Image (spheres, rainbow, N blue to C red):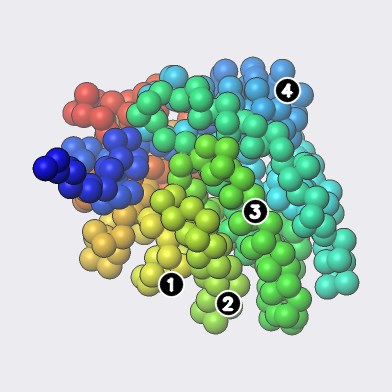
């Protein structure tokens, strides 16, 4: 009688997917936040050709091109879609511009009554080129390279929508959080819906892993942190797990500090991005290896280079021994980073260089 082979779960072969599945690895997979960006001459050339940063985001061919540039140059284990967390407010109808040396500028939402101006129905019409870029990137990627899709976490996106720009004190968003929490919840609910729908489309177009960027997770007191940071992220991940159970989600709650403990369990995130202030010993004792961790080299160390960089990299490699760890920076790469330092970093992590 013919016997069927035993049913086996198919194990992923791509290094990033293997690490996210908790499988052993000889070295951590590596990619860098903002790996496509101004430190690369070919990025500056393509951006100039596109006209502006936003034109680049909405041009599927050029967005795919800049996504692939760092893969070709450095052989990273993952590509991250080239886009921005502020495309969602723009798709909802909010005015957005990126000004040279000033960063993003939005038409700030001044009160709860203005929330009705946001139109969740129209987002995909605007975001179509992003999904097309995802498809193009996926087709062009080497077999062992994973495509990461992403979105901003609702709280961080809301801070820009309410402030109208980047800020250090988040005065407007905090005024909503403390003075009109119901209105802030309404805005966050709109963002949860839009983000789920946006990420769903990214996965359908070819994204294999998702990352949620919560750049301003570290600015709220505990109660508000739970309500306005954790809860919307939990809702997004729960919905994504229903839609795409096999797609891992990395959460990056920058600056969350002591809130990191319990964050993965509270949100359902499969992995946790650590910013560069998180002590490695603490992460080992309190998060890892139960939680896969990502990070957390200081981007300025990559500007410094030399022995300081080599030491920082070795310390990170030793801390996790390549297990349940994704090598990354503790925040985005900065424009003044020398390309040769990135090359040095990749050699150090891949084990083809042991010192400088
Ligand atoms: O990581 C990648 O390579 C993927 C692309 C990506 C960008 N922004 C491209 C970008 C991703 C994942 C982001 C996320 C993002 N965008 C965040 C969260 C992560 C973080 O850095 O904290 C935030 C807060 C934004 C909003 C944003 N976009 C700001 C505040 C700025 C201005 C600051 C700056 O560096 O100029 C941007 C612009 C931006 N987004 C650039 C890039 C490559 C620089 C634009 C340029 O070419 O001039």
- In the rendering, which numbered label is found on residue 78? none
N-terminal of the pair, mark 3 or mark 1, is 3
N-terminal of the pair, mark 4 or mark 2, is 4
In the image, 202 versus 54, the foreground residue is 202
Q: Residue at label 1?
A: 266
In front of the other: label 3 or label 2?
Answer: 3
- In the rendering, which numbered label is found on residue 50? 4
Disc 3 crowd rating (10 Å Cα; few below 14, some 14-19, many 20+) is some
Q: CA distance from mark 3 to mark 2?
A: 22 Å
Disc 1 crowd rating (10 Å Cα; few below 14, some 14-19, many 20+) is some
N-terminal of the pair, mark 1 or mark 4, is 4
Q: Residue at label 3?
A: 197
Disc 2 crowd rating (10 Å Cα; few below 14, some 14-19, many 20+) is some
Determine which quarter of the picture holds residue 127. top right
Drawn side of residue 206 relative to residue 76, left or right: right
Dividing the image into 4 quarters, which one contains the N terminus? Answer: top left
Q: CA distance from mark 4 to mark 2?
A: 40 Å
Drawn side of residue 289 relative to residue 81, left or right: left
Residue 276 visible in the shown view: no
Q: Residue at label 2?
A: 227
* Ligand 1 lies under 8 Å from the Cβ of mark 2: no
Cβ atoms at labels 2 and 1 below 8 Å apart: no
Residue in view at x 45 percent, y 45 percent: 209
Instruction: Pinpoint residue 117: horizontal percent, then vertical percent.
Output: 87, 61
Classify 204 as above or below 319. Answer: above
């Amino acid at each position: 009688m013919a016997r069927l082979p035993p049913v086996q779960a198919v194990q992923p072969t791509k290094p990033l997917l293997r690490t996210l599945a908790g499988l052993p690895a000889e070295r951590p997979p590596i990619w860098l936040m903002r790996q496509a960006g101004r430190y690369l001459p070919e990025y500056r050339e393509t951006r100039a050709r596109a006209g502006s940063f936003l034109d680049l985001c909405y041009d599927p061919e050029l967005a795919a091109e800049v996504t692939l540039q760092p893969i070709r140059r450095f052989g990273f284990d993952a590509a991250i879609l080239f886009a921005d967390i502020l495309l969602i407010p723009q798709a909802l109808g909010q005015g957005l511009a990126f000004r040279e040396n000033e960063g993003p500028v939005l038409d700030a939402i001044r009160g709860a009554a203005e929330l009705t101006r946001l139109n969740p129905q129209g987002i995909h019409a605007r975001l179509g080129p992003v999904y097309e870029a995802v498809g193009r990137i996926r087709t062009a990627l080497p077999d062992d390279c994973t495509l990461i899709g992403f979105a901003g976490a609702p709280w961080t996106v809301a801070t820009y929508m309410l402030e109208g720009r980047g800020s250090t004190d988040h005065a407007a968003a905090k005024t909503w959080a403390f003075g009109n929490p119901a209105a802030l919840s309404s805005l966050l609910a709109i963002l949860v819906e839009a983000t789920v729908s946006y990420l769903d489309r990214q996965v359908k177009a070819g994204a294999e892993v998702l990352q949620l960027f919560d750049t301003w997770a570290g600015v709220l007191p505990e109660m508000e942190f739970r309500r306005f940071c954790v809860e919307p992220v939990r809702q997004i991940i729960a919905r994504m797990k229903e839609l795409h159970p096999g797609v891992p989600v990395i959460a990056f709650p920058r600056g969350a500090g002591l809130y990191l403990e319990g964050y993965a369990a509270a949100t359902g995130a499969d992995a946790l991005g650590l910013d560069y202030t998180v002590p490695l010993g603490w992460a080992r004792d309190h998060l890892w290896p139960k939680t896969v961790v990502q990070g957390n080299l200081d981007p300025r160390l990559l500007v410094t280079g030399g022995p300081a960089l080599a030491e920082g990299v070795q310390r990170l490699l030793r801390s996790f021994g390549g297990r349940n760890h994704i090598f990354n920076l503790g925040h985005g790469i900065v424009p003044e980073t020398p390309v040769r330092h990135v090359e040095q970093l990749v050699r150090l992590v891949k084990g083809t260089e042991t010192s400088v």
